[in-house]
Image (cartoon, helix red, strand yellow):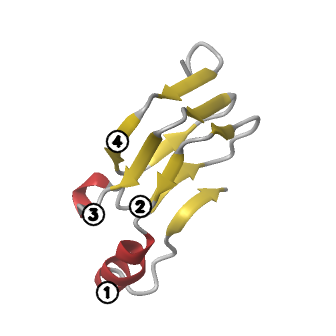
Amino acid sequence: MFKNGGGTVLIPFGQFLTGTLFLRSNINLYLSNGAVMIGSKELQHYDINHAYLIYGDSISNTSITGSGTINGNGQFFGTVISKLWPGLNHGFFQSV
């Protein structure tokens, strides 16, 4: 999709466990009604250099739409990752 210039990534109804999701320019991440993206509690599911659930670097024309839910497991990020990597800039979403 990225090589073709963009488009929509459709997350259908259901629960989906994920680690770091890298967004690119010209992409719409669409969460259907009843779709739930859940941030994994397994450290190996995250990019060591970008401890984010959703990450974009120098992107434009990018959106997250739909009526689904993103559950980033914020308590996990706030406790476990902070203990393992003190001072690491971590969070839910970052676009640089």
Lower sequence index among marks 4 and 3:
4
Q: Which residue is mark 2?
A: 49
Q: Which of the 4 image quadrants contains residue 28?
A: top right
Tag 3 secondary structure? loop
Residue under the point 40% across and 77% down? 75
In whole angstroms, how far apart are the C-alphas of marks 2 and 4? 23 Å
| CB-based contact (under 8 Å), mark 4 and mark 3 | no
Q: Which residue is mark 3?
A: 41
Q: What amino acid type should be assigned to the residue bearing mark 3?
A: Lys
In whole angstroms, how far apart are the C-alphas of marks 1 and 2? 16 Å
Q: Which residue is mark 1?
A: 83
Q: Where's residue 38, x and y in %?
A: 38, 52
Mark 2 neighbour density, 10 Å: few (under 14) some (14–19) many (20 or more): few
Residue under the point 54% across and 42% down? 68
Q: Is 71 above or below relative to 84?
A: above
Q: Nearer the viewer, residue 64 or 45?
A: 64
In whole angstroms, how far apart are the C-alphas of marks 3 and 2? 17 Å
Q: Which of the 4 image quadrants contains residue 24?
A: top right
Lower sequence index among marks 1 and 4:
4
Q: What amino acid type should be assigned to the residue bearing mark 2?
A: Asn
| CB-based contact (under 8 Å), mark 3 and mark 2 | no
| Discs 2/4, front | 4
Residue 16 is labelled as 4
Tag 1 secondary structure? helix
**Outermost top residue:** 4
